[in-house]
Amino acid sequence: MKGQPYPRMYLYRRLVQAKLFIDTHYAEPIDLGAIADEAFFSKFHFIKQFKSIYRQTPHQYLISLRIEKARLLLKAGLPVSDVCYRVGFESLPSFSGLFKRMTGMTPSAYLAEQQDLKAQIAAAPLTYIPGCFAHKNGWLKK
C-alpha cells in the first residue's frame, strides 16, 4: 500500500524554512547539501522544488542575496575588501566579477558613486527632497 503524499503546504513550509536558512547564514560558507538538509529534501529534488517556487536555483538566490547585502554595506561606506568577506565571498576577484555582472559596475565604482551622492546630498539637501514636502514644512523661500 502506498503512503499518502504530504500536503502541499507542508512542502512549501520546508522550502521556506530552507530559504530562511539561506537568509540567516548567507555570510557563512554554506553548501547545497546543508540547505537541502534544512528542507529534508535530496539535493536534486530540492533544487527542482526551490526553482519552481522562487524562479531561481538556491545558488543563484544565495549569490543575489550576497550581492544585495554587499550593496547595502558599500552604501554605508565600508571598504570593498571588508564587504567581500562580510557577505561570504572568499575571493575578492570573484566578488568583483559577480558584482559587476549583476549590477553593471565594479564594487569600487559603486562605492565611489555612493560617496559622491552622499556628498551632493550634504551640500544641497533641498534638491533631493520633493518640493511639495519642503514647501509644506516651510523649508523653501516664498
Image (spheres, helix red, strand yellow):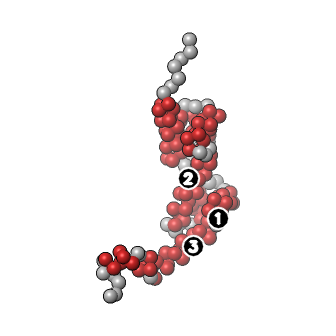
Sequence-wise, the earlier of marks 1 and 3 is 1
Given the current orientation, which residue lies at the most extreme top position?
1
Q: Residue at x 52, y 43 (%)?
A: 19
Q: Position of residue 2 (x, y in %)?
A: 56, 15
Mark 3 secondary-structure assignment: helix
Q: Look at the picture and state if 7 lies above or below 123.
A: above
138 to 106, vertically: above or below: below
Mark closer to the chain start, 2 or 1: 2
Residue type at the position of mark 2: Leu
Looking at the picture, which amino acid does disc 1 mark? Gly
Picture quarter with the C terminus: bottom left
What residue lies at 59% left-to-right and 36% top-to-bottom? Answer: 49
Which image quarter holds the N terminus?
A: top right
Helix, strand or loop under label 2: helix
* Residue at the spot of label 3: 113
Q: Are marks 1 and 3 in contact (CB under 8 Å)?
A: no
**How crowded is the residue under tag 2: few (<14 C-alpha within 10 Å), some, or many (20+)?**
some
Q: Nearer the viewer, residue 91 or 67?
A: 67
Residue 106 x, y percent position in the rendering: 64, 66
Q: Determine which of the numbered discs, if any, sits on residue 65 in the image.
A: 2
Position of residue 60 measured from the top left corner of the image (x, y, whole percent): 62, 48
Q: Which residue is mark 1?
A: 104
Secondary structure beneath disc 1?
loop
Q: Nearer the viewer, residue 18 or 88?
A: 18
Amino acid type shown at disc 3: Glu
> Is tag 2's residue or tag 3's residue first in the polypeptide sequence?
2
- Quarter where residue 52 is shown: top right
Q: Residues within 10 Å of mark 1 (few under 14, many from 20)?
A: few
Task: Report if the CB atoms under discs 2 and 3 are less than 8 Å apart.
Answer: no
